[in-house]
Amino acid sequence: MNRKLQIFLHVVADIVSSSGAWLLFFLYRKHIVEAVKHGYDIPVNNDLKLYAGLIFIPVMWLFVYAGSGYYRNIFRRSRLREVERTLITGILGSLVIFFLLILDDSVGNYRDYYKSLFVYFSLHCGITLVMRLLVVSRTIYNIQNRKWGYKTLLIGNGVNASKLYQELCAAKKSEGFFLVGYISGNNTEQSLMADLTCLGSISEVSSIIRQYGVEDVIICLDDEEHEKVPGLVDQIQNEKVHLKIMPDSYGMVLGMVKMNNILGAMLVEVDFEVMPQWQKTAKRFFDIIISMIAILIGLPVYLIIGILIKIDSKGPIFFRQERIGFKGKPFYIFKFRSMRTDAELAGPQLSSETDPRRTRIGSVLRKSRLDELPQFINVLIGDMSVVGPRPERQFFIDQIVKKAPYYVRLHRIKPGITSWGQVKFGYAENVDEMVERMKYDILYLENMSLGLDIKIMIYTALIMIQGRGK
């Protein structure tokens, strides 16, 4: 499967569709709507709107589709989902084009405006759907006939795994699972799947995924092994894979199982996405805008703080330290230095309100959270977001995970300058307080939205103004 080629085909189909729809709509406007008012056909060959639309409109649609995440997971398509997504984006995009390019046209009455909007929407969605369904049908055909597929790892080697294996092999139409092997669920290599190779044990799942380029993981453990599932999910969540789980009868009875595949194997897909793609795009856009404004407007403040730090104590103005961020990847965080340069000669230590290692200006900076201002640079780079769980050092993460293994779930999103935990709890002075603060960040993870981000930013601003940060 050539992912770049498939994306290219979708992009070309969308460009042809949007250009063709605009051309047909323009002809309709000139030869029918405006001709009725003026009593004669309006020449179109010299109309700049025609050519501007042929350039601007396809570009606008591509931005809309890319921002909504349409070009992600390009091989995992269904025709019904294509219809749904095309209609939703078509309505929103048509309204934008209507107000930008159509509202000032010359028409006989206002009914022609609404009729024009309907005609354009129908043309655009109709042509786009036809083009997309052609591309998607080709993809589905190649997957169902086992020409294309995803490298898939089975976790489990008992009865459930064997049943699933037999079902996938016997299916007339493939679901795209190209099995590369299995991971032993009971720490033995004995299996009812003689044709599959045992690639290792559960503790090695992350390294096996990377080694074999796995794209899909299916957990199909037997009933007595289900206590291993939560830990497995936590291990897999930071890998670039699609995770599916074979549900048990207990979960089905309670109505906890959600299925989106009627004819295929009975599998539940675990969705690691915490926000819709359009909200993630908007969040990143606001991160960049807010960071640029904060850096440009805050330059005088940066200068004053830098001078005060140099007057107060010897050492650099800025402090750089390695933290663990998105998907567990390390990065360097920037802060104004609030402690003496020899603060951690004895090893990593957390600070407290009465910490003697703090400088005089450092205590003020931490209470007002002004020491965090340089992290807008991290946001611009893309290592952080304005709002997100505070990033920690690996030294402390290792201690937190012993008490709260689910801490690693926070690595599903970018760390932030401020967070729900930071607003509600403040700086942590020991590992137990880190675990307490983490509970607020887990709640944030499960309830992420742009509205919640705005609330957290407002409360953070109030804490900075009042100087009551812990």
Image (cartoon, helix red, strand yellow):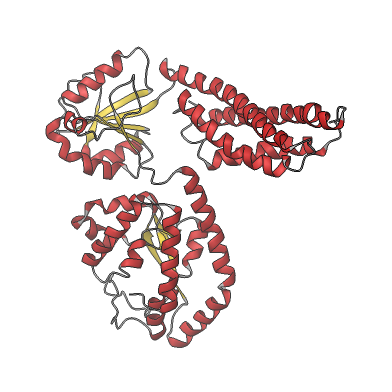
| Residue at (32% x, 24% y) in the render | 179
193 w.r.t. 244: above or below = above
Q: Left or right of 75: which side holds 429?
A: left
Q: Nearer the viewer, residue 212 or 47?
A: 47
Numbered circles on residues, count: 0
| Residue 326 visible in the current orientation | yes
Q: Left or right of 57: which side holds 353?
A: left
Quadrant of the image occupied by residue 391: bottom left
Q: Which quadrant is the C terminus positioned in? A: bottom left
| Residue 146 visible in the current orientation | no
Q: Left or right of 96: which side holds 419?
A: left
Quadrant of the image occupied by residue 44: top right
Residue 285: x and y, percent? 54, 53
Q: Nearer the viewer, residue 348 or 70?
A: 70
Residue 408: x and y, percent? 29, 51
Residue 182: x and y, percent? 25, 28
| Residue at (57% x, 78% y) in the render | 300
Quadrant of the image occupied by residue 417: bottom left
| Residue at (70% x, 40% y) in the render | 56
Q: Nearer the viewer, residue 124 or 347?
A: 124
Residue 455: x and y, percent? 42, 62
381 w.r.t. 234: above or below = below
Q: Nearer the viewer, residue 65 or 188?
A: 65
Given the current orientation, which residue lies at the most extreme left position? Answer: 224
71 w.r.t. 350: above or below = above
